[in-house]
Image (cartoon, rainbow, N blue to C red):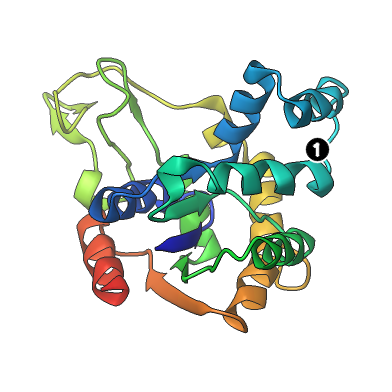
Amino acid sequence: MNILIFGPNGSGKGTQGAIVQKKYGVPHIETGVIFRENIKGGTDLGKKAKEFIDKGELVPDGITVPMILDRLQQPDCAKGWLLDGFPRNLAQAEALDKALNQANIKLDYVIEIILDRAIAKQRIMGRRLCATDNNHPNNIYIDAIKPAEKDGKVVCRVCGSDKLTTRADDQDEAAIDKRHGIYYDTKTGTLAAVNYFRERTRVIGVDGAPGVKEVSEALLKKLA
């Protein structure tokens, strides 16, 4: 089963992707990891990508798409894959679709985690990190994982630590708005990419507003 997964920052896309990956036993492939592996491995594409990265420039699609395609053709992808983080815009969607067709690789599903932009932003800004374990989920705006209270203090809902912090980039509204501006753009942005695939394959839309369990249950039911 070959799947693309989309969702705005704050939608829980990474969490749902991990659940799908575990359910179907396919690799969860993130574009950032592909870049790092190619650069570290000194591949020809990795060397070309590094030249742009070192100059602070975006890596051209002509390098990114072949790099992704190469990863999708590795032995561990023989039974399928879940691609996360690409494409981010309409042009990349067109380039990826063309490359997949030329390689005779069928795209089976596109997953879209749907979440209102204001709620997505609120969720990002509501994240709280536990000093004991960053994997302890806490978010002041999500009832299911809202931090607990003890002796008048806000504490980690998992371990009770009163050392909860925020990431600087989670509180940078301008940066959040910029990322979301790209994602929610239906003309040339990420949602335009989703709509491009909507005309070519099955797109499974899932409401990202409920809790993780409810979202995953709805998603897996539609994938079945």
The residue pinned by badge 1 equals: 59
The residue at the point 85 percent across, 23 percent down is 51
Residue 135 in picture, x, y percent from top left: 29, 28
Between residue 59 and residue 181, name the one nearer to us. 59
Q: Quadrant of residue 44?
A: top right
The front one of 67 and 205 is: 67
Q: Amino acid at mark 1?
A: Val
Which residue is pictured at 19% across the width and 19% down the height?
Answer: 161
Instruction: Identify the image quadrant of the C terminus.
Output: bottom left
Q: Residue at x 27, y 20 (%)?
A: 133
Q: Quadrant of the rendered structure where residue 145 is? A: top left
Left or right of 115 on screen, residue 132: left
Position of residue 185 relative to residue 14, above or below, is below
Instruction: Identify the image quadrant of the N terminus.
Output: bottom left
Residue 69 appears at what percent x and percent y?
64, 49
133 and 93: which is toward the camera: 93
Residue 214: image location, x then y, percent: 22, 64
